[in-house]
Image: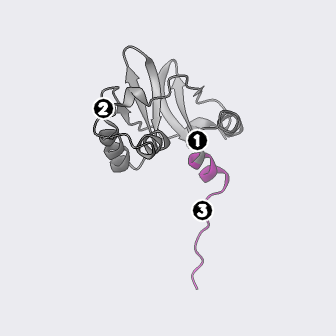
Amino acid sequence: MLVRDAMSTVVLTIGPAHTLRQAAALMSARRVGAALVLDPDAGMGILTERDILNSVGLGQDPDAERTHAHTTNNVVFAAPTWTLEEAAQAMAHGGFRHLIVLDGGEPAGIVSVRDVIRRWAPARRRVPA
């Protein structure tokens, strides 16, 4: 199975000037754990729920903190033609749970550990009692 079969194709995209609270609200509304950050100065990056959690845990103000200060810019990108094994290996090796998927240099989706697990172990069907 390939990354393109498991990835989310609707990608939440935010800018570097969004506050962490704004980012968290958008991520919560879309029920996603990561957002693509497009920064004209730093390029493409990713902000995850963990980045927001770490900031709040440090006592930083989510209304004052901007996403650019918490974005990971040295991102490992996946291709839609990667296997799920390759994606899982990249996530395990890098210690992260999301990969931005690029197709022809453009964002095509995001694949998460949860996406991989859903494909490898589909939810059990409930058997009527």
Query: Which percent across, then down, holds residue 68?
Result: 39, 26
First-in-chain label (2 vs 1): 2
Q: Mark 2 highlights which residue?
A: 18
Closest to the camera, between mark 2 and mark 1, is 2
Q: Which residues are magenta?
A: 114-129
Q: Position of residue 96 (x, y in %)?
A: 60, 38
Residue lying at 50% horizontally and 28% vertically, measured from the top left: 72
* First reached walking from the N terminus: tag 1 or tag 3: 1
Q: Nearer the viewer, residue 80 or 13?
A: 13
Residue that label 3 marks: 123
Secondary structure of the residue carrying tag 3 is loop
Tag nearer the camera, 3 or 2: 2
| Rendered location of residue 112, percent (x, y) | 56, 42
Indicate the quadrant containing the N terminus: top left, top right, bottom left or bottom right. Answer: top right
Q: How many marks?
A: 3
Q: Residue at x 47, y 26 (%)?
A: 45
Residue in the foreground of this view, choosing between 99 and 64:
64
